[in-house]
Amino acid sequence: MGIFSLFSKEKKEDLNQGLSKTKTSFFTRLSRAIVGKSTVDDEVLDALEETLVSSDVGVETTLKIIDNIQKRVSKDKYLGTKELNHILKEEMGALLKEEGDTAYKRFEIPESVARPYVILVVGVNGVGKTTTIGKLAYQFKQKGYKVLLGAADTFRAAAVEQLQIWADRVGVPVINQGSGADPAAVAYDTLKSAIAKQMDVVIIDTAGRLHNRVNLMNELGKIRNVLKKLMPEAPHEVLLVLDATTGQNAIEQTRQFSAATEVSALAVTKLDGTAKGGVVIGISDQFQIPVKYIGVGEKINQLQAFDREAFIETLFEGVQ
């Protein structure tokens, strides 16, 4: 099976367009940095470092990449700038952490996992959390799964209504107790209903912002505890949704939510609207949390299962 074996022509085009701004920005800067140079020297490495940081790869990850390239230059003694893109491709790809089980790439639930498979979705307001839930529900439903949504983001007045709109659009049921309801109670009732109705997938929305981190930590802890009363292994997944256009803010959000709860996977949205796609590499490397999904467009089918090889191949496609 080739790199794009799981990708249709449409998905490849979506990924290519989704990364176009990042690709253009990054390689334009890099080309300017190495113009007239024949070897990778300190000046080229300094310019590369600046290019990586400005592409929101992050300082820590950038220094790791530069250090690895320096070691290769030292080992090979002579390294031409023509080889730099190939080396960069290898180094950046090596830093991307990916889910071990590849079933998710087909939007399938692993056979070994008991039903219902419970996904707790977290993230700040405005990152595309509700939209991601709707698109996830659509993909799972397309695979024949019975999906139930839980509207546990009851602190924001519009959140419950937005999730209901997505549920109606996708054609899946939602447990909705209205704005102001106890989030943990909504989560409990959602899973209880899912077990009774033999649903396959449960996706629970949570508050994007509370008064402080302690409040957020306590609320997410309560939700996890009530889910475990019904199903000890739940939630099977805590999915943090991040907005790629926020760049380094996405890294800080990952730090905050990782401290508040056990984040097990990431969904990075709005890649098509930014030149900051390098943040995917920085977050994955710094936190060792797999990127599971990426948003490459507004259409309902433009949430893609993340494929590390496809991502890197697309990013470097056509680059000499």
Image (cartoon, rainbow, N blue to C red):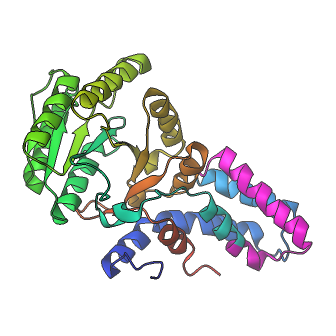
Q: Nearer the viewer, residue 38 or 93?
A: 93
Q: Nearer the viewer, residue 132 or 41?
A: 132
Q: Residue at x 36, y 71 (%)?
A: 14
State the predominant SS element of the stretch in magenta.
helix
Q: Residue at x 35, y 24 (%)?
A: 221
Q: Is residue 91 above or below residue 208?
A: below
Q: Quadrant of the N terminus?
A: bottom left
> Magenta residues?
57-86
* Position of residue 125 in the picture relative to residue 318 (left or right): left
- Residue 296 in view: no
Quadrant of res 181: top left
Place of residue 259 in the rendered image (x, y in percent of width and height, measured from the top left): 49, 28
Q: Is residue 219 above or below residue 122?
A: above
Place of residue 106 in the rendered image (x, y in percent of width and height, measured from the top left): 32, 67
Q: Nearer the viewer, residue 28 or 41?
A: 41
Q: Residue at x 13, y 54 (%)?
A: 146
Quadrant of res 231: top left
Q: Indicate yes or no whether the magenta region holds residue 27.
A: no
Q: Is residue 249 above or below residue 307?
A: above
Q: Quadrant of the C terminus?
A: bottom right
